[in-house]
Image (cartoon, rainbow, N blue to C red):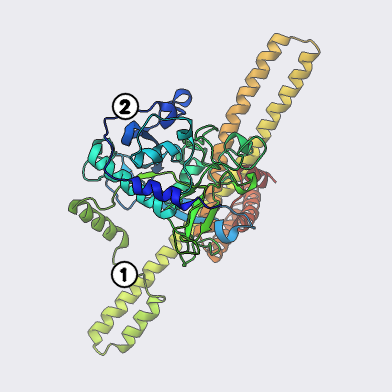
Amino acid sequence: MRWPVPAVLTLLMAWGAPASAQEARWPDEYTDPAAAGAGAADLVLPMPCGAAMAFQKVTVPVDAADAVADPLADRRLMLGQALHATGFSDYLRPAFLRGPFAEPGTGVTHFFIARYELTAGQYRALAGQCGEPGRADRLAQGGLSWFDAVDLARRYTEWLYANAADALPGGGQARAFLRLPTGEEWEYAARGGARIDATRFPDLTFFGQGDMRDYALHQAPGSGRGRLGPVGLRKPNPLGLYDIYGNAEELVLTPYRLNAAGRLHGQAGGIVTRGGSVLSTADQLYSAQRTEYPPHDATGAPLRSATFGLRLAISAPVVTSDARLAEIRRRWGELAGAASPHGAPPDPDALLAGLIAAEPDPRRQAALGALQLEFRRARDRTQTARLQSARSTLLAGAVLVGSLSENAGLIEAKAANIRMLVSLQRAGRGSTLLARQVRSHARQIEHLRTVRAAYLLSYRAALDTLSAEIAPDERRTAHDVLREELVLSDRPRLLTTLDRFWDDLEIYARNPGTGPDALLRMALD
């Protein structure tokens, strides 16, 4: 369904000089409706007409002791979903993320993303149409094109710079601005970021097996009726973001790309919306879902839809000063060494051999020969280090399989004790003492489950590392060496768990999107 173009053009034409920042502030129910029950948003930015926009802080831990000192540190993620029907679009792939704002002395960065979808009231305020807010201003704003969304972010940034620049985060020379979120930012935030249990991050939805109607306005009895509804009516995700699924489908900055069996395909396509809409069914709503649309309709005009909305993000430039650029170059040099920025040649050893054969000067030929020898030694050392790393990870996986099995046995034993004690209670034997024992066993089971979650997280990390970062032939070599060592050292129990972990690894490599429950069953089978 397309939004009538004249209605949108009327609002766009109404944008003119910014309204005063001194208008009476709108009540929270129009700017941060969840504040009364869930607490205020992490950041609230003013808007024209007394409106405001609420944002949540999205923490992105990076691999560095000090994120400020290491501008190239980022976080490796596995995004997407291992669904056969949509694998061409949404399949699992590695991605990297870093927030534009960093906390000195820590390996923590962050960005901000709007707590709610843009509302009709906020859209009206940015159009300079001031007035008392009403019920209709709570509705998610639809009818946008991608170009409208980008221009809206620009206009809001301009207004903030002119009227409330100090309200933007960052400070210093990293002057923040508003834009659409990238696909990676949107999905990381939608899944719950660092706030969700890491074992649940890969799940289809952030709420696991719950009812979609509790979290989204969508096409279902008792949910959406095909029209955009008020924001903030359903439950939030772990980051405190509302309407991540359903209601308006949210435009993002990144163009559409296919998934080429685990990586983004090279061809960039049309515009993308995330999160589905009120027209989506429950099975069409999940964190990795992406929908492509052409940016223009058949007439060449920007494509608009009644369900196209947005959720703004706050970002900042990467290079903020000459000093920061110098730091980036220095750090890049440390990481890259003498490597070419365009990548090493396909076969550097063969290239060196050709240069040696073609060199007429004996002294230069000898120098190149020494360089070739050192290169081969370095390559061998790297290969040995990779195999050692793979071997260590395989050993850790074997230990974790054993630990998970032992943990499951302890949980079952405690559960059996509880069943026995409950039976004695029902028989009327020492009910007070038995009740205390039941509570004690229940507490111990809860502790064991917490330990199991930690084991399971490490177990998935070992599977991810071996399946995504170690080549199959290297995995096999490391496995064969480790297995021979265990045979020679007479470690039958560890040998058994290694074989089980190896079988699990083969299964996981074919289906890396395995959820935590299936992952546990796989480890215990």
Q: Which residue lies furthest to the left in this view?
A: 322
Q: Mark 2 points at which residue?
A: 24
Q: How far apart in space, not on screen, are marks 1 and 2 (Cα)? A: 58 Å
Element class at badge 2? loop
Q: How many labels does the image show?
A: 2
Marks 1 and 2, the one that precedes in the sequence: 2
Within-10-Å neighbours for mark 1: few <14, some 14–19, many 20+: few
**447 to 285, vertically: above or below:** above
> Farthest residue in the bottom direction?
360
Q: Where is residue 30 in the image (x, y as percent from the top left)?
A: 43, 30
For the residue pair 109 and 62, the one nearer the viewer reads as: 109
Closest to the observer: 192 or 358? 192
Q: Where is residue 247 in the image (x, y as percent from the top left)?
A: 54, 41
Horizontal relation, residue 378 to residue 78: left or right: left
User: Looking at the image, can residue 459 be seen?
Assistant: yes
Q: Which residue is the site of mark 1?
A: 340
Residue 319: x %, y % from top left: 25, 53
Residue at 60% across / 41% down in the picture?
218
Say which amino acid is labelled 1.
Answer: Ser
Give the residue at the far right of this rendering: 427
Q: Label 2 sits on what residue type?
A: Ala
The correct choice, above or below, for 336 with respect to 349 in the image is: above
Note whether 431 is above or below 104 in the view shown.
above
